[in-house]
Image (cartoon, grey):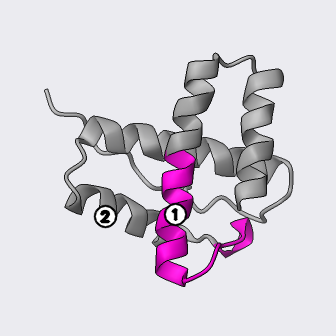
Amino acid sequence: MTEAIQQFLTHLARERLFSPRTVEAYRADLLQFCDHLRGQMGRPPSPSEVDRAAVRGFLGHLVRTGFKKRSIARKLTAVRSLFGYLTREKTVPNDPTAGIRSPRPER
C-alpha cells in the first residue's frame, strides 16, 4: 500500500503539478488511512484488499476520535483520489470509495 501511495503522490507532484503543501497533506491523510488499516489487519494491506467496509471503518474511526466533518471530508477526498488513480492504472479492479458520501460540513 505504501508503494501505491508513493506512486500516487509522485503523480500528483509531477503530472498534476500539485503544490508541495497539498502533496504533503495528501501524504499525511493517506498514511493515516494506511496506519488505520494496518491496525485493523495486523499487517500492511495491499490496495486490492481495501473494500468499502474498510473505508467506512476508517471514517467511523475518525468520527469516534473527534475529527471535525470538514477534516473527515478532506481525508475521504485523499482516499477517493488515491483509489481513482489506482482504478485508472488498473492496480485495483474497482474503487472501494464509490458511493460513499462525504459528511456535510457544519455551518
State the predominant SS element of the stretch in magenta. Answer: helix
Q: Which numbered disc, 2 or 1, marks the residue closer to the eye? A: 1
Residue at the far left: name it.
107
Whole-number angstrom distance, CA of label 2 to CA of label 1: 15 Å
Which quarter of the figure is the C terminus placed in?
A: top left
Q: Which residues are magenta?
A: 29-49
Q: Looking at this view, is 2 or 53 the one in front?
A: 2
- Number of residues whose C-alpha sits closer than 10 Å to that of mark 1, classed few (under 14), some (14–19) or many (20 or more): some
Q: Position of residue 96 (x, y in %)?
A: 59, 63
Residue name at image x 61 percent, y 70 percent:
50
- In the figure, is residue 78 to the left or right of 47? left
Q: Secondary structure at mark 1?
A: helix
Residue name at image x 31 percent, y 64 percent:
60
Q: Quadrant of residue 14?
A: top right
- In the figure, is residue 42 to the left or right of 103? right
- In the figure, is residue 21 to the left or right of 65? right
- Number of residues whose C-alpha sits closer than 10 Å to that of mark 2, classed few (under 14), some (14–19) or many (20 or more): few
Q: Is residue 33 magenta?
A: yes
Q: Quadrant of residue 78?
A: top right
Residue name at image x 48 percent, y 54 percent:
32
Residue name at image x 32 percent, y 64 percent:
61
Which quarter of the figure is the N terminus placed in?
A: bottom right
- In the figure, is residue 81 to the left or right of 94? left
* Amino acid on which disc 2 is placed: Gly
* Amino acid on which disc 1 is placed: Asp
Q: Secondary structure at mark 2?
A: helix
Residue 35's disc number? 1
Q: Is residue 82 magenta?
A: no
Q: Is residue 15 visible?
A: no
Q: Is residue 41 visible?
A: yes
Q: Is residue 33 above or below residue 28?
A: below
Disc 2: which residue: 60
